[in-house]
Image (tube, rainbow, N blue to C red):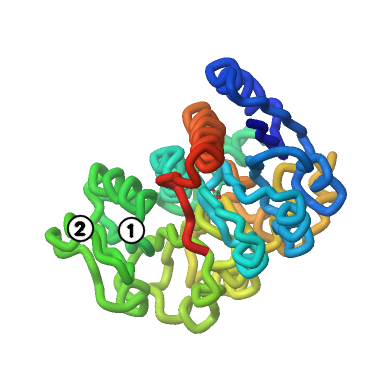
Amino acid sequence: MKIIAYGIRDDEKPYLDKWSDENPDVEVVSTDKLLDDSTVELANGADGAVVYQQKPYTASVLDKLGEFGIKFLSLRNVGVDNIDAEAAKRNGIKVTNVPAYSPEAIAELTITQLMRLLRRTNTFDRKQANGDLTWAPDIADELNQMTVGVVATGRIGKAVIKIYEGFGAKVIAYDVFHSPELEKKGMYVDTLDELFSKSDVISLHAPATKDNEHMLNDETFNKMKDGVYVLNPARGSLIDTDALIRALDSKKVAGAAIDVYENEVGIFNTDFGSFENIPDERLKNLMKRENVLVTPHISFYTKRAVRNMVYFAMDANKSLIESGKSDKLVEL
Ligand code: COI
C-alpha cells in the first residue's frame, strides 16, 4: 500500500516519519508541495493521498486523482470548504478530515486573544516599546462581568464555553443543532439576532457554509451592543471585513481578534519582509489598530494538534485503503 502526503511542513515531518516507522506495511511518500495541477502527477501509483492546504482542491485535480484510480483523500485539518464536492463525488473519492485534532488548542488561543483585548495588553506593549510606562488611557473590562455569545457549539464551541464559564462569564449560544448538555443549562437562544443583541463578546466557531458567508455584516453589526468584542478563529468568510472596519471606526466594535481573514490564502504564513510589503490594504488597516489582534491562522498550531493532524489523517487514509471505511468520513 502506498500513501502520498502532500504539503508536509518541516514541523510535520518528524510525526510523519514516526507514523511511517510504526506502519512498515505502508510505503509513505511525501512532498512539501501542495496538491494542484502541477503536482497531481506525483500521486500516480499511490492508493491514497493525505493533504492539507487552504488553496482549493479543484475539479481538475480531483478528476486527475480519479483517473489515477485514487479514491481516498484524507485531510489533515477539519474544514472541507475548499473541496469541489461535485468533482469528488463524480470521481467516487471518499474524503476524511480530522474533526478533533485539538479543539482545546483553538479554544485556548481564542481566550488568550480575548483577554489581551480586554486588558489592553497590545496598547501597553506598544507604549512600553517607546519607553512609556504610564497606564493606558482607557480602563480594562472584566470577562467575569460579561455575556459571551458563542456561535456554533461543536467541539471547539464546547471547549471554549468551558473556559468562558471558568472565568465566570455568562454564556449564551446559538446553533441549529442543540447539544443536550448545553440545552440542559438553558444556554441556547433562538436566533442569531438575539445572540447579537445580548452579547458583550461574540465568539465565532462555525464552519464556512454557503449560508453563513458574511454572517457579520453592516446589518448584523448594527444589532450588536455598542462596544462589543468580536472573536473569529473559525473562517474568514464569516465576517465582511469592510463592515468590520466600519464598525471599528464607529466604535460599535471595541475590539476584534481574528485568526482568519477572508483574503488570507497566500498571505498568511508568508514572510513579506516588512509590514509595507504585505499586499493587502484592508488587512494592514486592521493590523495597525491597537484594538485589533491579527494572528495568521495559528490557533491550531500546537505540538499536540500538529501531531494529531498527521497521525489521524494517515490512520484514516490507511483504513480507507484497507477496508473502504473510516470513522472520519465526511459527508460532502
Ligand atoms: C482547520 O482545521 O480547518 C483549520 O482551520 C486549521 C488549519 C489552518 C490547519
Task: State yes or no: discs 2 and 1 in contact (Cβ < 8 Å).
Answer: yes
Q: Quadrant of residue 172?
A: bottom left
* In the image: residue 150, left or right of residue 211: left
Q: CA distance from mark 2 to mark 1?
A: 9 Å
Residue pictured at 63% horizontal, 69% vertical: 86
Residue at the limit of the structure toward the top, as seen here: 21
Counting from the top left corner in percent of width and height, residue 160 is at 34, 48
Report the number of numbered marks.
2
Q: Quadrant of residue 26?
A: top right
Counting from the top left corner in percent of width and height, residue 135 is at 48, 42
The local secondary structure at tag 1 comes to: loop
Label 2: which residue? 182
> Dot 2: few (<14), some (14–19), or many (≥20) neighbours within 10 Å?
some
The numbered disc on residue 153 is 1
In-front residue for pair 230/134 = 230
User: Mark 2: which amino acid?
Assistant: Leu
